[in-house]
Image (cartoon, rainbow, N blue to C red):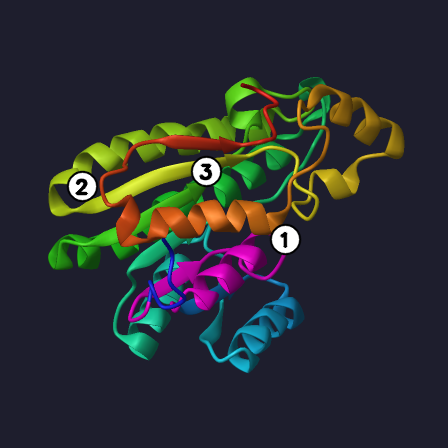
């Protein structure tokens, strides 16, 4: 059973926390007692709104600007959280973009941008957070993948490769740090109402996809956030190296 303060004393860093699934995760972790660093790259107003909502609800949050796909900026983001609160206990690697095109029309820039933001940023942030988790012999890392990284999707070769890479990354790092009581898991959302992919679809495309989802509806960012929150708690201490799809049965 969750209590409102089950994450009290914990510090969470949510990359790409200003919008969509990321903002829902930040707010949910804060509601469970965590102090939350809301990372953003360009969406300053949205990030400040998320932090303000958390603070007005009695929580604790700060915004942290930085392009976490760049080495020095990812390091700086982690260091700013360390300076503000002294530690990071929960890392949610959520930063992500799409640059959808059929492969024959996809530029090298389209490929590299998505790989950098969706995959390299997780490597960098994990690398800079990991030493303190190992030292304290406690911590949670949750990587936000996608069902596209499991089943693929036309026009998303770059996104599918990045999200599939996150799954492999999750499983490898989980094995590296399991003996230090640090868990590493992946969450793979399907089509989420406030998750970006759905917003870009035409009405006809939405109808087609809904017909493929056994539950007959899109998910919500809050539903994804609840799963991430559970994996962040002590209740999930014996779960590591796993991939949790949350997709209404789409790829069951």
Q: Is residue 80 visible?
A: yes
Q: Are marks 1 and 2 in contact (CB under 8 Å)?
A: no
x 46%, y 76%: residue: 59
126 vs 57: above or below? above
The answer to which quarter of the image holds residue 244 is top left
**Disc 1 designates what residue?**
20
Q: In this picture, which residue range is highlighted in magenta?
A: 8-34
**Disc 2 designates what residue?**
177
Task: Say which element carries label 1.
Answer: helix
Asked if the magenta segment contains residue 15, the reply would be: yes
Q: Earlier in the sequence, mark 1 or mark 2?
A: 1
Side (left or right) of 59 relative to 22? left
Of the pair 154 and 99, the residue shown nearer to us: 154
**Disc 3 designates what residue?**
187
Q: Is residue 94 visible?
A: no
Q: Residue 121: horizontal and vertical position, in percent? A: 43, 47
Mark 3 vs mark 2: give the one in front. Answer: 3
Of the pair 140 and 93, the residue shown nearer to us: 140
Q: Residue 147: horizontal and vertical position, in percent? A: 55, 28
């Amino acid at each position: 059973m969750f209590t409102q303060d089950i994450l009290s004393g914990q510090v969470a860093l949510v990359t790409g926390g200003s919008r969509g699934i990321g903002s829902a995760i930040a707010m949910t972790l804060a509601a469970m007692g965590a102090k939350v660093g809301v990372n953003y790259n360009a969406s300053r107003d949205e990030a400040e709104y998320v932090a303000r909502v958390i603070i007005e609800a009695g929580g604790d949050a700060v915004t942290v600007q930085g392009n976490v796909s760049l080495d020095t900026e990812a390091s700086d983001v982690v260091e700013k959280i360390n300076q503000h609160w002294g530690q990071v206990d929960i890392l949610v690697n959520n930063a992500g973009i799409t640059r959808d095109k059929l492969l024959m029309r996809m530029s090298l820039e389209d490929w590299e941008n998505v790989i950098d933001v969706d995959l390299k940023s997780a490597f960098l942030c994990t690398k800079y957070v990991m030493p303190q988790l190992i030292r304290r012999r406690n911590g949670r890392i949750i990587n936000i993948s996608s069902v596209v990284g499991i089943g693929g999707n036309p026009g998303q070769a770059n996104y599918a490769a990045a999200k599939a890479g996150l799954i492999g990354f999750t499983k490898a790092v989980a094995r590296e740090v399991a003996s230090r009581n640090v868990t590493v898991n992946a969450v793979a959302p399907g089509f989420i109402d406030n998750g970006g992919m759905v917003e870009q679809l035409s009405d006809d495309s939405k109808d087609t996809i809904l017909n493929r989802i056994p539950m007959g509806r899109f998910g919500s960012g809050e539903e994804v956030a609840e799963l991430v929150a559970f994996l962040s708690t002590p209740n999930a201490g014996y779960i590591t190296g796993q991939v949790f799809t949350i997709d209404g049965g789409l790829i069951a």
